[in-house]
């Protein structure tokens, strides 16, 4: 697996966030179960959101593409800055970390509270 850095969309606090990730190898096979925890920083003990294939926060699109969805309720109280997350396959024994970490910027919208 190669490592690369790419710019993507920021989370707009209070709004649903979606992002599709594409891997260079088939790491999301049919039937895989995925889990991720969203935190303000890696060292934080507080979890902002738990995303899984079971709860719809992570959706396998193909063997190489997964979609991340963070609901508006989970982004509502995020301060400007960034969040971090990684991803684990939980259908394997033992669970398998997919060896990447995302840092996603968070911005405060002008239009909010509608």
Image (cartoon, rainbow, N blue to C red):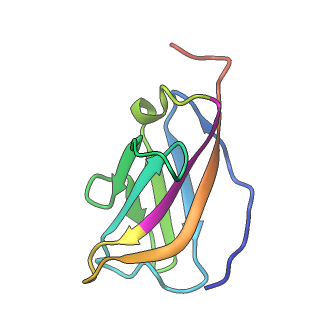
Residue at x-position 30% and y-position 71% = 33
The verdict on residue 8 being magenta is no
Residue most extreme to the top: 114
**Residue 86 counted in the magenta span:** yes
Q: Which residue is drawn at the image coordinates 58% and 28% (left, top)?
A: 79
Where in the figure is residue 80, as x and y percent of width and height? 64, 30
The image shows residue 14, relative to residue 91, as above or below, that is: above
The image shows a total of numbered marks equal to: 0
Q: Position of residue 96 (x, y in %)?
A: 37, 79
Q: Position of residue 100 (x, y in %)?
A: 56, 70
Give the prevailing secondary structure in the magenta stretch.
strand
Find residue 49 and report its image quarter: top left
Residue 106, by quadrant, is top right
Quarter containing the N terminus: bottom right
The segment highlighted magenta reads 80-87
Please name whichever residue, 68 or 83, is drawn nearer the observer in this view of the structure: 83
Q: Is 25 placed above or below 33 here?
A: below
For the point 73% across and 66% down, the residue is 5
Q: Is residue 99 above or below residue 105?
A: below
Q: State the residue in front, 20 or 39.
A: 39
Q: Position of residue 11 (x, y in %)?
A: 60, 39
């Amino acid at each position: 697996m190669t490592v690369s850095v790419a710019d993507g969309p920021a989370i707009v606090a209070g709004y649903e966030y979606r992002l599709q990730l594409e891997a260079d190898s088939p790491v999301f096979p049919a039937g895989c179960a995925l889990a991720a925890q969203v935190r303000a920083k890696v060292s934080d003990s507080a979890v902002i959101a738990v995303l899984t294939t079971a709860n719809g926060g992570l959706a396998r699109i193909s063997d190489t593409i997964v979609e991340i969805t963070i609901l508006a309720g989970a982004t509502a109280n995020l301060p400007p800055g960034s969040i971090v997350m990684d991803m684990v396959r939980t259908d394997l024994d033992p669970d398998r970390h997919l060896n990447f970490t995302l840092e996603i910027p968070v911005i405060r919208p002008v239009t909010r509270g509608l």
